[in-house]
Amino acid sequence: MNLAGFFNAVSACMVLLMLMSVGYVMGRLGWMTAREKGFVSKYIVNIAVPCNCIVGLLNNLDHDSLASAGWMLAAGLTSIGLTLVISMGVATLIRLPRERWGVFVAMAAFSNTLFIGIPVCTQLFGDACMPFLMVYYLSNTSFLQSVGFLLIEYSGSVRKERTTVLGFLKNVFVKPPILGVIFAICMLLLDLSLPDPLMRFAGYVSDSVTPLALIYCGFIVYEVGLRNLRPMQGHVTMLLMRLVCAPAVCLCFCSLFGMTGLARSTFAVESALPVVSQITVIAGAYGADEKYAATGSCLSIFASCITLPILMLILG
């Protein structure tokens, strides 16, 4: 058992909660509203995270190490796919009402790989984890954008136009974080590097991801309200799926695909993170149970502060 890893995870969770408390207090004081929340979200996803991807990949990967990325992507896709299937079965067994069924499955199957994943993993493993984190993010967002959104739509009262295969590919591969990954991989394949001023610029912008992402999550907790954080039907089961079952499945597939060391640890932590905050927004857009999604998301944030240190003990 790795006690150093355990205490490192406890420390990381304390930092996470302190940064989140800034967002919560700013909400209470009225310094941050839905308008500022929208700005922070757009800045993180469209500017800061792409810079983070470029810096992390170019600084920690080379041309020769790209060959293993395909196997890692396969491990991520298969583990998330199986977790998704298990979640659908569990949601059916506990007889959730339709307006919560798809929301439960999406919360149980998909982790918050960016807003919480980047801060947590870089706190635990440093910037060297970024290449593996982005591979897992690609696996996670591919399922979320396709199957995840369809399941939430099934639970909602609002019907929208079905997405074609071309539309799905467009939705996934025009996202700035994915474009950042593709750009960095092309640079690595061509054995090219960015000029020093551009790398320093990307580094400065990249450093803003962690504090702003956690402030954003803290504001979400404020929006839900601490008094409203009471588990509803299926929430406890969802937490077990999200924070226990998902990492167990991921570790099995990491072993199956021969992943070890930092890659395995990064995948395990990424799979054991809280609910994707985007699910709450999509649930509201499709007319599903938005409050159920928001409460589950906040509960998973606090519960992960207990499960992540235990996971680090298991990882050794």
Image (tube, rainbow, N blue to C red):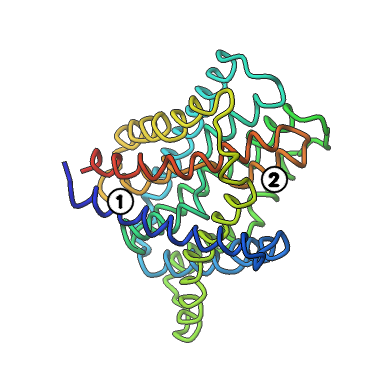
Element marked by disc 1: helix
- Quick check: 159 above or below 137? above
Against 41, residue 132 (above or below) is above
Q: Nearer the viewer, residue 116 or 181?
A: 116
Q: In which image quadrant can residue 283 be found?
A: top right
Crowding around mark 2 (Cα neighbors within 10 Å: few <14, some 14 to 19, many 20+) is some
Q: Which residue is mark 1?
A: 10
Tag 1: amino acid: Val
What kind of residue is marked 2?
Answer: Val
Which residue is pictured at 59% across the width and 64% down the height? 26
Q: Quadrant of the C terminus?
A: top left
Q: Residues within 10 Å of mark 1 (few under 14, many from 20)?
A: many
Q: Quadrant of residue 127?
A: bottom left
Q: Secondary structure at mark 2?
A: helix
Residue 281 disc label: 2
Question: Image check: 303 left or right of 140?
Answer: left
Residue depicted at 42% across the width and 68% down the height:
58
Left or right of residue 118: residue 264: left
Looking at the image, tell me whether mark 2 or mark 1 is earlier in sequence order: 1
> Measured from the top left, where is residue 101 in percent x and y?
65, 24
Closer-to-camera residue (182/313): 313
Q: Is residue 44 left or right of residue 66?
A: right
Label drawn at residue 174: none
Select label 2 or label 1 by which is in front: 1
Please tell me which residue lies in front, 81 or 65: 81
Q: Residues at badges 2 and 1 in contact (C-beta under 8 Å)?
A: no
Image point (73%, 32%), residue name: 288
Quadrant of the snapshot with the N terminus = top left
User: How far apart, in angstroms, are the residues tagged by discs 2 and 1?
Assistant: 30 Å
Q: Position of residue 289 (x, y in %)?
A: 71, 32
Whole-percent x, y for residue 225 in the image = 61, 46
